[in-house]
Image (cartoon, coloured by chain):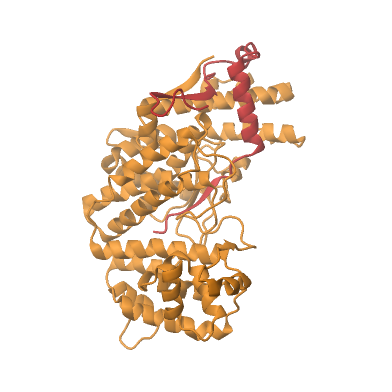
Amino acid sequence: MRTFRLSDAAFAALAAGRPSAETIAELHKAQISRHLLLLREVTQINPKKTPIWYAEPLPEAPRSASLSDPMKALHTSATLTALRAGSTPPGPTEPSPHHLSTTDAGLTLRVRLEDTDPLRARLGLTPSRQLTGQEVDTWRRLLAEAWHLLATRHRPAAATVAAVLRVIVPIEPDPGSAGLSATSAEAFGAVALSTPADATALAVGLLHETQHSLLNATRTLFDLVLPGAQPTYSPWRDDPRPPFGLLHGAYAYLAVTRFWRTEAAASGQALAQFEFARWRSAVAESADALAGLLTPAGARFVRALRAEVAGWLADEVDPEIERLARGANIEHRVRWRLRNLTVDAEALAEAWPDGRPPAATPRAGHTGRALERSDRLDLVHRLLRDGDQSLPPGSRQRLGDDAWLRGAAGTAVHAYVQGLNSMRRATEPETPPGPREVDLWAGIAIAGPWRSVRERPELVRAAYLALPGQELDKIADWLDFSS
Amino acid sequence: MDRTADKEAAAWQSPMVDVSGMSLEELASHDGDTALAHCLRRLAAELDDPAEPIAGFNSAL
């Protein structure tokens, strides 16, 4: 029996986010094979559960088409899981009638807008209710506009999307987010998306989620990550992620970075430069962080991914935009550490005389997905999109952020430290920092000179609260030296 | 093993069998196949430890 095989060149191109049409065809075959094997298991447990589309295929829906339908694959997987668990499998489903097709520059994208399948919630986020005709029209218009952008300016990526994407599941928006999306390993070619703000957001979302589908399909062929590793930092989430989740983020953002690189080169727009500068660093650092956590195939995959983004690290970006991008990445890491890590006060007191700061431990009580907004990042986006965001003269609100946006780091850090000092007495060391405190620590990290605040803010915070007689700069200086 | 050779492999060999052109009946006739058995064990392990949906991309724009 033939097993799948990819040449090293094809595997490396796939890892670099540039799979050939032949490689994508192999991934499709692998997914059809996977679906068929799951179906074999279903029918061996209960022959009556052979789906009607397989037992009695229609001329307009042959078995081959149904086997490659992501929602049918999801259904088969759910059926097998239920049968194995002794629970009731899902009933038969009917696909939605909303077939969207858009052609631009000779390239066609055909997708089904799936708003009826009860299993669509299994893509990970809350599905929207059944769409109205007007909502379907909105999706059709946005898809055509996004496709125009992709097909004309991002041609190779558009060809990959056209070859992979089959189903879009509209989901409920998140009030705290500009746009959400999700992908399931059980539904190759299906993505869940909230109604995008505009065509650019949709284009980026499609590229992003297509990468997740590609990586899931690659995972069907090859084990990429060693088992047993602890969840770790990911630049794209506020919760700890397993190594495969980190790889997913890096692979998805490789395509996002390439998109913004092209947009920045075409338009020179500040926002495009910012997104490019921010994500190229995040992808490269995440690839580096995966070292030691990968199988041989995974190591090869990440090496090719890293090589692709390495070629972009020397691209010129406006230094001021680069500063803001670097700040955004530092801020995210600081927020993540304060949210997820803590330092035991007793261990800190014991370690202090030896000059060897204690290690951080995971903070209890935080589990699951988290996405938090940063007001400062919103300000940066607005500055880059709309220009000057200076405060009115005399205003004392957002003093630190205002200075940070203007590049006045000294003024910014002074304002942030003042804000932190004013909260000091009311802050309990054992209590997780609230949003305002986190915001101030992140501000100090991006604007201040202290490596310890950037890299181990949870430790600096613990020391700052344990030593009420000491100024922050003295503590941070000392930890810079000793940690 | 996921690869054919040491270090710089010319190709990467997957444990996944290509049954994409088969029917369920044809598949049943291969029940004793070692590669198929290995592949089914791998799939079963995957089902026992499913990956979470990759959810939560925030376009931030």
The residue under the point 41% across, 46% down is A287
The residue most toward the front is A354
| In front of the other: A441 or A61 | A441
Give the left or right position of residue A474, taking residue A269 as reference.
right
| One can see residue B49 in this view | yes
Chain rendered orange: A
Across and down, in percent, residue A19 comes to 37, 32
Which residue is the extreme one toward the right?
A86
Front residue of A383/A227: it is A227
- Chain with colour red in the figure: B
In depth, the one of A247 and A205 nearer the eye is A247
Report how many numbered discs are placed on residues in the image: 0
Residue drawn at point x = 49 percent, y = 72 percent = A460
- Percent x, y for residue A129? 58, 50
Q: Position of residue A293 (x, y in %)?
A: 50, 43
Q: Is residue B38 above or below residue A369?
A: above
**Left or right position of A123 against A381:** right
Indicate left or right for A58 with A9 as reference: right
- Looking at the rendered image, the quarter that the N terminus of chain A falls into is top right
Image point (32%, 41%), residue name: A308
